[in-house]
Image (cartoon, rainbow, N blue to C red):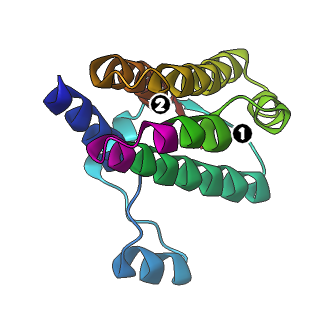
């Protein structure tokens, strides 16, 4: 089960764009490097202003840091850290509810709200200090990440 969860986390991280020196150079030159598979990308384009895109990317990076903190907490059997991180950094707040609704897509909003709700559920399960149940809750939460990233793009 642990291998499955860690594999899911790796898949999530690998689906995000890298920020290599080449990427930075290409952006400075006004060019974007696209893989051959980009033309077959059937995900729904979220039409949002550039400023909002940057804010969303920043939020996604913060979410990834929180997931990393959760995994590290699980490895250290620090269930209090896992619970606090899940609630405070990923849980459903008014701010997160508003963010999810700003994209003008009901399915995007639904998945986003489910993600944040599942993060709160993870925080509650972690309080039981049951590693297997906590890993399952993490898996359930991460499935929302994968679902959203597989359906939508900026």
Q: Which mark is residue 145?
A: 2
Camera-nearest residue between 78 and 132: 78
User: Quick check: 142 above or below 84?
Assistant: above
Q: Quadrant of residue 7?
A: top left
Q: What secondary structure is marked by label 1?
A: loop
Disc 1 to disc 2, C-alpha distance = 19 Å
Q: Residue 3 carries which label?
A: none
The x, y position of residue 134, in whole percent, is 38, 23
Q: In this view, does 108 lie to the left or right of 24?
A: right
Would you say the residues marked 1 and 2 are in contact, meaning their CB atoms lie under 8 Å apart? no
Q: Give the range drawn in magenta.
A: 71-82
Camera-nearest residue between 92 and 29: 92
Point 71% across, 28% down: residue:
92
Q: In which quarter of the image is residue 93?
A: top right
Q: Name the residue under label 1.
A: 47
Q: How crowded is mark 1: few (under 14 residues within 10 Å), some or many (20 or more)?
A: few
Rendered-image quadrant of the C terminus: top right
């Amino acid at each position: 089960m642990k291998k499955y969860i860690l594999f899911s986390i790796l898949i999530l991280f690998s689906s995000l764009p890298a920020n290599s020196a080449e990427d930075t150079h290409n952006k400075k030159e006004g060019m974007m490097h696209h893989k051959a598979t980009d033309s077959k990308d059937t995900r729904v384009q979220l039409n949002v202003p550039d400023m909002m895109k940057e804010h969303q990317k920043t939020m996604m990076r913060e979410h990834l840091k929180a997931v990393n903190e959760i995994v590290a907490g699980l490895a250290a059997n620090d269930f209090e850290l896992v619970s606090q991180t899940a609630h405070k950094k990923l849980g459903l707040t008014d701010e997160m509810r508003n963010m999810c609704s700003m994209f003008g897509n009901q399915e995007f909003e639904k998945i986003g709200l489910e993600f944040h709700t599942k993060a709160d559920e993870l925080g509650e399960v972690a309080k039981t200090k049951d590693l297997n149940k906590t890993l399952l809750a993490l898996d359930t939460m991460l499935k929302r990440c994968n679902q959203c990233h597989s359906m939508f793009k900026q």
